[in-house]
Amino acid sequence: MGSMNNTYFYHDKPLFGLDVGYSSAKAMQLDWSGKKRVVKGYGVTNFPSDYVSNGELKNPEGIANVIYGLFEKQLIGEITTRRVAISVPATRTFNRPITLPKLASKDIKEAVYLEAEQYIPIPLDELYIDYAVTGQTETELQLLAVAAPKKMIDSYVILARLLGLELVTLETSIAASSRLFEQAEQSDSPTVLIDFGSIAADITVYHHDLVVTGAVPCGGDIFTDILADKLGVTKQEAHIIKTKYGLGVSKKQEQITAALNPTLTDLLKEIRRVIRYYEERASGNTKIEQVVTMGGGANMPGLSEFMTSSLRLPVRMCNPWENLAFGDLQPPNNTEKSMYVTVAGLSMINPTRIFV
């Protein structure tokens, strides 16, 4: 967000990614000097969940203090720049593909605002609105409009200021994750990407770019809370059940599936809605060919098989680390790697493509 429509000159300076979630913050910087991108530094830290509410940082001072501790004591490797790309939660933003007749550049903004007024249930003066051109014909423009509450965006700007960082871009979590998919897969097939965070699953159709997005409360922590409640166990026990058995074949499969079924039904309903929206508007009868999952919640055993059976589409996890190396640094283990999906995507923003 922030400068998709402006083209000024760029400075080829390094940047790092900072992913501030609902109870954790991750940082990562890449070294772009060689043929392969190498992780220069990374790390994760946690803070109380009441520091964030509905995507807005309610205690930016407290979060800044925790992140200072990450920079000073917890990093593996080092962060060598103050230029930062920060993610904002996709679940708190409004994304919509818009088709407009060919307009002069000066008229596009007004047309986008008029369209946004019809579909966003928040007064426009409480939103930041941006857009990017995703395609065009001789008579039409295809745009992706993005809007986010000013209070939420301003809280991240305050955080960057408290940390003494130069904020060069804000990007939704699903946009960052999709960059990782693009770099790892280089797929030309229309794909549904699902990024399972801690409390929500961000859903997008990706075909050379983000096309249409959605979200549903269906993250890793949600699965744990449901299992703890329905099975009458502690959250720690529920986490073990989720990661060890999940939806896979086991003595607990029927119980686990029954407990998670309402939430998974909502997830499947939103996936089908996004697919239908895309295919009804795609040219040449283009169809979704696959579903690719990412993020911590995607690790749950049996989830891909369950979704494949329900959607009648191939569902698989993405391996986003093929084009990243950790050099001399100790890499995170396989179960931890999924938590770095968003921040890795942010760190893969090419510094030469940042306009300032």
Image: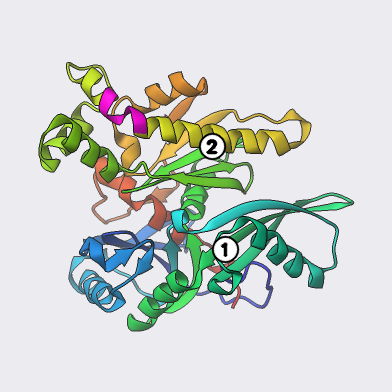
Name the side, left or right, on which 48 lies relative to 247: left
What residue lies at 43% left-to-right and 29% top-to-bottom?
316
Q: In which quadrant will I find the C terminus?
A: bottom right
Q: Which residue is mark 1?
A: 147
Q: Secondary structure at mark 1?
A: strand
Decide if residue 222 is in sight here. yes
Q: Which residue is mark 2?
A: 192
Q: How many neighbours does mark 2 have within 10 angstroms: few (below 14), some (14-19), or many (20 or more)?
A: many
Where residue 261 appears, as percent x and y from the top left, is: 33, 27
Q: Main secondary structure of the magenta part?
A: helix
Front-most of residues 89 and 54 = 54
Q: In the picture, residue 265 is in which quadrant?
A: top left
Decide if residue 15 is in sight here. no
What residue lies at 27% left-to-right and 50% top-to-bottom?
331
User: What amino acid type is highlighted by mark number 2?
Assistant: Val
Q: In which quadrant will I find the N terminus?
A: bottom right
Where residue 30 appears, as percent x and y from the top left, is: 41, 61
Q: In the picture, residue 71 is in which quadrant?
A: bottom left
What residue lies at 33% left-to-right and 63% top-to-bottom?
53
Q: Nearer the viewer, mark 2 or mark 1?
A: 1
Name the side, left or right, on which 348 lies relative to 53: right
Q: Secondary structure at mark 2?
A: strand
User: What amino acid type is highlighted by mark number 1?
Assistant: Ala
| Distance of label 2 from label 1 (alpha carbons) | 22 Å
Instruction: Point out the stretch of residues depicted in magenta.
Output: 258-262
Magenta residue check for 139: no
Does label 2 or label 1 sit earlier along the sequence? 1
Q: How many neighbours does mark 1 have within 10 angstroms: few (below 14), some (14-19), or many (20 or more)?
A: many
Where residue 275 appears, as percent x and y from the top left, is: 59, 34
